[in-house]
Amino acid sequence: PEECRFVIEEVVERAGVASRHRYGCRVVQRLFRRCSPREVAELADRLLADAANLAGHPFASYVMQNLLRHGTDRQRHAFGRALERDVASVLKTSAGCGTVAVAMEALASEDAVWLARAAVQAPGLLEALPLVRFGSAAAIGILKNLQGPELAKASSRFSAIKSVLGASRYGHDIKAYLDARQGSAECR
């Protein structure tokens, strides 16, 4: 709405700082929820310039998740590519795992597949996800976006650490997903 224009103008100049701030991030999130994509386009572009760093930040990650949910197709595509380039560093934090989990649902299917492939190619990355909060959501999103030999490779990497999955607070969901997937494959 037009009455938000002055807020947008103020926030754009300090988009990264506001997004990383405990309370500022809430203002930026609401701008994405309540304003049209055209009104927040400049704000989105400023955030996309530092997308990978913001995606893994404890407060800014929520801003970036709102950008994924409410942004344009172009913005989501650009964000997906940024995540793909730095997926290993983003998935090392619980905030980054939450952002990747949202990305797996919000990105166009082609972009989600590219991001999932990048995660699978990073050595040791999948095996670390059960140890991180929101890692299971990211892992399941990755698995859902893979097919064929890529899915088999990722699944076998998780199967190799079944004892970790069972013992990990966050690994239970991945184990349950793999077991359900295996059970449905056996029924076919």
Image (tube, helix red, strand yellow):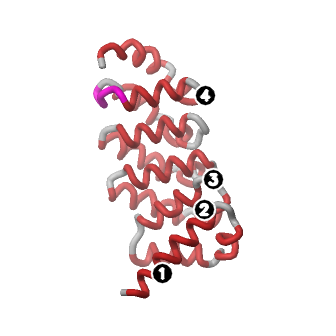
Disc 1/disc 4 C-alpha distance (Å): 42 Å
Q: Earlier in the sequence, mark 2 or mark 3?
A: 2
32 or 172: nearer the eye?
Answer: 172
Disc 2/disc 3 C-alpha distance (Å): 14 Å
Name the kind of residue labelled 4 in the image. Arg
Q: Quadrant of the N terminus?
A: top left
Residue 46's image quarter?
top left
185 or 55: nearer the eye?
Answer: 185
Q: Earlier in the sequence, mark 4 or mark 2?
A: 4
Image marks 1 and 2: residues in contact by CB distance under 8 Å: no
Q: Earlier in the sequence, mark 1 or mark 2?
A: 2
Dot 3: what SS?
loop
Q: Quadrant of the C terminus?
A: bottom left
User: Residue 135: where, in percent of width, then height?
Assistant: 59, 57
Task: Tell me, for residue 125, which label it has, or none.
Answer: 2
Name the kind of residue labelled 3 in the image. Arg
Dot 2: what SS?
helix
Disc 4/disc 2 C-alpha distance (Å): 29 Å
Q: Which residue is mark 4?
A: 22
Q: Earlier in the sequence, mark 1 or mark 3?
A: 3
Q: Which residue is mark 3?
A: 133
Dot 1: what SS?
helix
Residue 171's image quarter?
bottom right
Q: Which residue is mark 1?
A: 182
Name the kind of residue labelled 2 in the image. Leu
Disc 1/disc 3 C-alpha distance (Å): 24 Å
